[in-house]
């Protein structure tokens, strides 16, 4: 068999069976996989000298034998010290706060060390040096500085093993790499060839090399993603049809008359973009972005009524039962006395009769949760599917809803509403197959909510203030991270973040940024139960306080919400279940306890629960940390400060994104949907724009990507993104 990228790793010349076994452990089962195992970063290795030749106040590199070590447990910075001897010369090594090194750096071992050199008594010292333990057969000292790749490795399979293996096979492998970019495009974009890119990233000669290589590999990835996205759109256009939902002036007037308010200019602009979509037989896919309370639902309802008016059905899918119930309430209110037949389809309401009615077209407007996606749900004629709070649902869910139209060639229009603003760059990738409309600002008469961040010692004052306002007839939310002090993982009941796209929409995971903050024992976490007890015994004694959380059953929850809406309950102590959609205009105060435990997107959503009526809202973020944007502030502190500084969700999203490169917004939106291995949406923003334009033109020229010269690119694209984007199934 001639050598190819598919050659099993053990059969590649130069790879021993022992090394092959190690590489297989990391999934590097063949030559191609090994080549595609990219360095995490590159390290500069200085030219090596003897210890005698080390120069103070420079970065030095030397090798020698460890003769003695000790741990010094001195506060505040315990340290680990070692003595390294080279040709009778002594180099003192010290590592601060890394006493665990005692198990790695032992007398008798030979080490190569690199770090800042300082004069130390009569000799020299290196502090916090990087080091390699040298094997018997280690390479001789290199007299020239070089750049060395550091690979993703494991405890058992070290980066060095991978480095050596790649170094051995690289010259054999590079000629096997087929180029998939047309030469003129590659040259125009000033990209290295694929083979050059792999050579430069595995074996850079200088710092620029790796960057040059990364640019090409990231571009490839983004280009393929964007081509995939545009192919999907073009296929939708070419193969499927949606019902044309025309708005005549008469229909328009009848719908508008239903609303108890005039639509705002911003809502009308969104509608002006949506209605032509709907009037066409081309299935549309549109994202409506707008801050919490900006009036997205009103716009979506307009579109749903167009569908119903044209004799079809429309469905609205919400992420939680609570929110679905609330949509039902408000929509029933608006449609009271009309002939539109509305039904609620959730896990609790689902039954044979309801399913039969939906299939027979006896219901026009179906509001529900992900129960709508169940196999047995069939529509008579679904013309429009509206998905609320997109970040909780994935592309797969959208595709599933699409397939629910009655016959094969017909598919509904899809509108996606999200209150989690997504920076434009992200919208173009993650939601790249969607058109985007934005509703800016809030309906008239709203006053922006004031946000204050306070430290825990001010809690008494906070609750004095809450008491004062409650006694004036206003209402409050108090939000805590857990249901009871036994809850293992705080917030797990309701979903602090996003659902895993591959999993069920109801399985909610924590954003990574939050779990990393949670190191304390669970007893430190404030719970609904504790707080109800604390507040009714002390600060809010005599007022009516009730819990609300995801472990209450549907009826209990419903009853509590009704009592809160009617004002019988003055203060709700809740988990993040109130995060989305709870709409009680008389609620003016929200206190969020242990605010540092919530993500930014979440805090913003929670804040949106108040200030929905005529009175302005107040949001108090209570935490052990002081809000700050100082350079040394932690992520959590900066998040708090951002919230105090702005109520505009879009600015918040951009700010958060810039702050950390990838904020919660980013994670929530990106989760599971773009398996980007090389490209980083933040770092490679400009590259993404470039790739997007190139992809658009490409698909315009070749709407099916089926020319022979495109076969290789097509195959690689399908492999990378076919499944994620549902390209295999139509939709
Ligand atoms: P979103 O879904 O974007 O969070 P909603 O559509 O639920 O916002 O609207 C929030 C609140 O504002 C609702 O109580 C709704 O009745 C009200 N509302 C929506 N549009 C307008 C408008 N044009 N004028 C006045 N109130 C409005
Ligand atoms: Mg909403």
Image: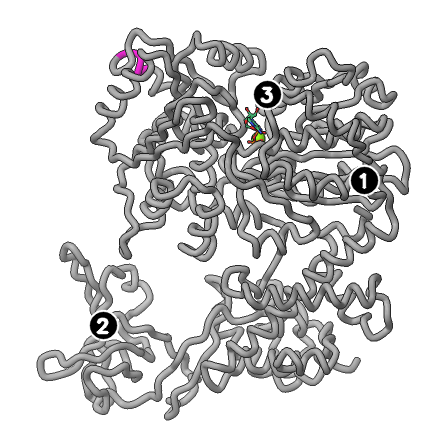
Q: CA distance from mark 3 to mark 2?
A: 61 Å
CB of mark 1 near ligand 1 (< 8 Å) = no
Quarter occupied by the N terminus: bottom right
Element carrying mark 3: helix
Instruction: Identify the residue shown where x is 70% and y is 78%.
Output: 185
Q: Name the residue beneath numbered marker 3.
A: 326
Write down the region rendered in magenta: 533-537
Q: Mark 3: give few (<14), some (14-19) or many (20+) Cα within 10 Å.
A: some
Position of residue 405 in the picture relative to residue 585 (left or right): right
Instruction: Identify the residue shown where x is 51% and y is 74%.
Output: 161
CB of mark 3 near ligand 2 (< 8 Å) = no
Numbered disc in front, either 3 or 2: 3
Q: Name the residue beneath numbered marker 2.
A: 127
Q: Position of residue 458 (x, y in %)?
A: 22, 29
Q: Quadrant of ligand 2?
A: top right
Say how the picture is coloured.
one colour
Tell me which secondary structure the magenta stretch mostly adopts: helix
Q: Name the residue beneath numbered marker 1.
A: 279
Q: Position of residue 413 (x, y in %)?
A: 77, 39
Mark with earlier residue (1, 3): 1
Q: Is residue 539 above or below residue 2?
A: above
């Amino acid at each position: 068999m001639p050598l190819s990228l598919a050659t099993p790793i053990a059969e590649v010349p130069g790879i021993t069976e022992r090394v092959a076994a190690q590489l297989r452990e990391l999934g590097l089962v063949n030559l191609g996989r090994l080549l595609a195992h990219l360095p995490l970063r590159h390290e500069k290795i200085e030219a090596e000298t003897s210890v005698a030749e080390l120069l103070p106040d420079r970065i030095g590199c030397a090798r020698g034998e460890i003769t003695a070590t000790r741990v010094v447990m001195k506060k505040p910075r315990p340290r680990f010290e070692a003595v390294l001897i080279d040709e009778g010369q002594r180099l003192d090594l010290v590592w601060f706060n890394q006493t665990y090194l005692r198990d790695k750096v032992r007398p008798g071992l030979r080490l190569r060390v690199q770090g800042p050199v300082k004069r130390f008594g009569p000799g020299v010292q290196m502090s916090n040096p990087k080091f390699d333990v040298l094997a018997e057969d280690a390479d001789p000292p290199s007299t020239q500085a070089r750049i060395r790749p550091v690979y993703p490795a494991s405890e058992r399979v070290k980066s060095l093993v991978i480095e050596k293996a790649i170094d051995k096979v690289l010259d054999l492998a590079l000629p096997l790499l087929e180029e998939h970019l047309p030469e003129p495009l590659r040259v125009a974009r000033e990209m290295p060839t694929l083979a050059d890119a792999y050579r430069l990233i595995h074996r850079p000669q200088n710092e620029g090399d790796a960057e040059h290589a990364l640019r090409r590999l990231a571009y490839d990835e983004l280009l393929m993603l964007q081509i995939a996205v545009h192919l999907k759109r073009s296929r939708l256009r070419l193969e499927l049809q949606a019902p044309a939902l025309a708005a005549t002036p008469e229909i328009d007037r009848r719908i508008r008359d239903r609303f108890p308010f005039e639509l705002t200019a911003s809502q009308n602009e969104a509608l002006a973009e949506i209605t032509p979509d709907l009037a066409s037989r081309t299935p549309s896919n549109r994202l409506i972005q707008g801050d919490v309370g900006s009036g997205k639902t009103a716009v979506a309802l307009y579109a749903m009524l167009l569908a119903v008016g044209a004799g079809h059905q429309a469905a609205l899918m919400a992420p939680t039962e609570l929110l679905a119930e609330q949509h039902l309430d408000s929509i029933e209110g608006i449609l009271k006395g009309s002939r539109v037949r509305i039904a609620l389809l959730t896990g609790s309401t689902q039954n044979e009769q309801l399913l039969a009615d939906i299939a027979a077209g006896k219901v026009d407007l179906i509001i529900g949760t992900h129960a709508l996606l169940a196999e047995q749900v069939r529509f008579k004629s679904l013309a429009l599917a509206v998905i609320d709070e997109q970040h909780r649902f994935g592309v797969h869910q959208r595709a599933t809803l699409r397939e629910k139209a009655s016959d094969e060639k017909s598919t509904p229009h899809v509108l996606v509403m999200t209150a989690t603003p997504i920076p434009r760059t992200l919208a173009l990738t993650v939601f790249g197959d969607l058109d985007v409309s934005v509703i800016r600002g809030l309906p008239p008469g709203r006053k922006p909510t004031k946000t204050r961040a306070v430290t825990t010692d001010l809690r008494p004052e906070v609750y004095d203030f809450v008491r004062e306002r409650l006694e004036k007839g206003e209402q409050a939310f108090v939000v805590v991270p857990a249901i009871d002090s036994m809850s293992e993982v705080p917030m797990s009941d309701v979903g602090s973040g996003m659902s895993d796209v591959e999993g069920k929409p109801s399985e909610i995971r924590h954003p990574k940024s939050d779990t990393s903050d949670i190191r304390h024992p669970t007893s430190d976490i404030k719970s609904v139960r504790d707080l109800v007890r604390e507040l009714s015994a002390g600060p809010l004694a005599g007022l009516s306080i009730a819990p609300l959380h995801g472990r209450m059953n549907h009826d209990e929850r419903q009853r509590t919400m009704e009592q809160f809406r009617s004002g019988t309950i003055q203060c709700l102590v809740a988990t993040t279940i109130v995060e989305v959609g709870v709409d009680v205009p008389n609620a003016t105060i929200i206190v969020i306890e242990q605010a540092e435990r919530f993500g930014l997107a979440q805090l913003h959503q929670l804040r949106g629960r108040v200030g929905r009526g005529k009175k302005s809202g107040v949001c108090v973020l209570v935490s052990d940390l002081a809000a700050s944007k100082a350079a040394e502030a932690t992520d959590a502190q900066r998040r708090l400060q951002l919230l105090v500084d702005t109520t505009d969700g879009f600015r918040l999203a951009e700010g958060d994104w810039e702050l950390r490169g990838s904020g919660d917004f980013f994670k929530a939106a990106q989760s599971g949907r773009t398996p980007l291995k090389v490209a980083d949406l933040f770092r490679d923003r400009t590259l993404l724009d470039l790739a997007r334009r190139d992809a658009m033109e490409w698909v315009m020229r070749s709407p099916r990507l089926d020319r022979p010269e495109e076969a290789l690119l097509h195959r690689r694209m399908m492999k990378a993104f076919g499944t994620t984007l549902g390209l295999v199934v139509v939709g």
